[in-house]
Image (cartoon, rainbow, N blue to C red):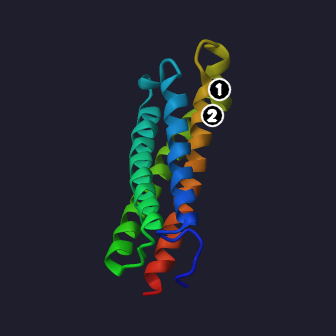
Amino acid sequence: MRELPGRPGTWGGLCLRLGQAALAAASIGVMASAAGFAGYTAFCYLIASMGLQALWSLGLACLDGYALKVKRDLNNAVLVSLFVVGDWVTAILSFAASCSAGGVIVLFEKDISFCRRYYQLPCGRFQLATAFAFLSWSLSATSALIMFWVLASF
């Protein structure tokens, strides 16, 4: 069970972490470039959650890169349990932020036709940022499940 792809200190783990960080950063960049996002709490929460996701993922990507460079095994029960808690917390926050932003977008687009009435509102950017956030969450949830399985194998 310890030979799962994506576990800490492997190329798979490094790629998962870099993917999470890149998608979170893309979500932040697209949302920050959209004028007027700060007026909506769900979009601000998305920025904050993706910032936390990017920092956590970059930190663990650096740790994975270091472990690969010095050929060190990161399968320590205490270290993996820390990864499990951090991954689950960031995954839950990312999912909640993505869902709340997605809910606001559906409200704007489909329910009250806010985007058609106020064409200057960058609804396309809101949608793109939320899509990047959901993709980042999917990698984060994958990583959280892998960490849980690695911890269960100790």
* Res. 61 mark: none
Disc 2 element: helix
* Res. 128 mark: 2
Q: Quadrant location of the C terminus?
A: bottom left
Q: Quadrant of residue 26?
A: top right
* Above or below: residue 95 compared with residue 13: above
Q: Hey, which residue is sitting farthest left in the picture? A: 78
Determine the residue positioned at 60% across, 72% down.
5
* Residue 126 horizontal/vertical position (percent): 58, 30
* Above or below: residue 47 compared with residue 99: above
CB contact under 8 Å: marks 1 and 2: yes
* Nearer to me, 20 or 111: 20
Disc 1 element: helix
* Nearer to me, 51 or 2: 2
Determine the residue positioned at 43% across, 50% down.
58
Q: Mark 1 points at which residue?
A: 124
* Nearer to me, 30 or 120: 30
- Say what amino acid the circle numbered 1 marks: Gly
Determine the residue positioned at 55% across, 85% down.
1
Query: How many neighbours does mark 1 have within 10 angstroms: few (below 14), some (14-19), or many (20 or more)?
Result: some
Determine the residue positioned at 47% across, 33% down.
43
- Say what amino acid the circle numbered 2 marks: Leu
* Residue 109 horizontal/vertical position (percent): 65, 28
* Residue 81 horizontal/vertical position (percent): 36, 74
State how far apart marks 1 and 2 are (Cα). Answer: 6 Å
